[in-house]
Amino acid sequence: MAGAALPGRLNWQLGTVTELVVETPRTKSLVLDIPQWRGHRAGQHVDVRLTAEDGYQAQRSYSIASAPEDSHLVLTIERLADGEVSPYLVDVLGPGDELELRGPIGGYFVWEAAADPPLLLLAGGSGVVPFRSMLRHRMAANSNVPMRLVYSSRSLGDVIYRDELLAADHGVDVELVLTREWPEDWSGHRGRIDQKLLRELAWAPDEDPAIYICGPNSFVEVIAAGLVDEGHDPRHIKTERFGPTGN
Amino acid sequence: MEPLDGNAIAGALYDVYGAEMTTATGRCTVCGAMDQIAELRVYVRAPGMVARCRSCDSVVFVLVEVRGTTHMHDPCFELMP
């Protein structure tokens, strides 16, 4: 049975890096060619596994940044200073290198373009990655669902997919919030998202949006609780947390 | 340590159940709270992966990988049909 896919198992596959895109000083996108990729839904992730020469293995989950309709699978990786996996992915891996992964994984934090409710996305740092998949999926599927992305980032230079996000239109509204540094002429939002800013940036509960929050645990907790306080139905709020960031 | 959530162990759960499980609902047998697996509090840096109830913080299950196979110990977890 070597090489054959076992039913009911998520098999490890080899992908080949075809291109690396520098997104920010700490973040790169890996463009992967995976011969037997069975497709994914916007918001899903993959597990990536590295094996050292002595057999030691380390495994991490990474959100998929590409849309289901895109020709290649794209993962966007933030380098964590004390990371076991991300420094290799960001600094060492090059075009032509192979990467072991399994997926797609996850059925909870996904969005289908056929869904009707307006889409409210709130990202902290690299929590924006699954939302880029949703944004591209929405465009590829010609969806007219209003979409608002509220993206909290430390500085403008840390904003991943900046050009793509700022160019988004046709019912897509991107609100950048810079928490630590901002350009002198920055007219956008600044500082951490507090209740007042959240009220300003989130749609009202009577718009009945589908809400997705992705970021570090502290970000997700504060934003989710804040939205519930504003009157949003907790059943319409989906959350995904990721591990320690480089802070 | 900051917890993650059930999304982080979707791959390991797939190993155990042979299916996507994050949207499945489970019941904490300590307090009776029902949550989707994606919503559980999960600690991945413990020995093994530890999932705790959002309501009462009890350990509902633990996943451990031994020689390539994921094992589940679920003292306080009841998967809903």
Image (cartoon, coloured by chain):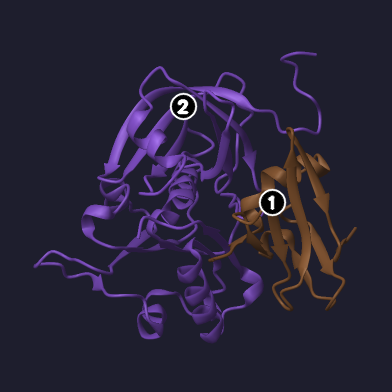
Q: Residues within 10 Å of mark 1 (few under 14, many from 20)?
A: some
Q: Nearer the viewer, residue A222 or A117?
A: A222
Q: Residue B25 location in percent, x, y?
A: 80, 62
**Furthest-front residue in view?**
A54
Image quadrant in which the N terminus of chain A is located: top right
Which residue shows up at 32% across the image and 51% down it?
Answer: A165
> Which chain does brown denote in the image?
B
Element under label 1?
loop
Chain hosting mark 1: B
Image quadrant in which the C terminus of chain A is located: bottom left
Residue type marked 2: Leu
Lateral position of residue A12 relative to residue A227, left or right: right
**Disc 2/disc 1 C-alpha distance (Å):** 30 Å
Q: Residue A136 location in percent, x, y?
A: 44, 44
User: Measured along the vertical axis of the image, is residue B44 above or below residue A88?
Assistant: below
User: Can residue A44 be seen in this snapshot?
Assistant: yes
Q: Residues within 10 Å of mark 2 (few under 14, many from 20)?
A: many
Q: Nearer the viewer, residue B70 or A171?
A: B70
Which residue shows up at 58% across the image and 39% down it?
Answer: A47
Instruction: Give residue B48's mark.
Output: 1
Which residue shows up at 69% across the image and 65% down it?
Answer: B40
> Which chain does purple denote in the image?
A
Q: Nearer the viewer, residue A218 or A152?
A: A218
The residue that mark 2 highlights is A32
Lateral position of residue A142 relative to residue B77, left or right: left
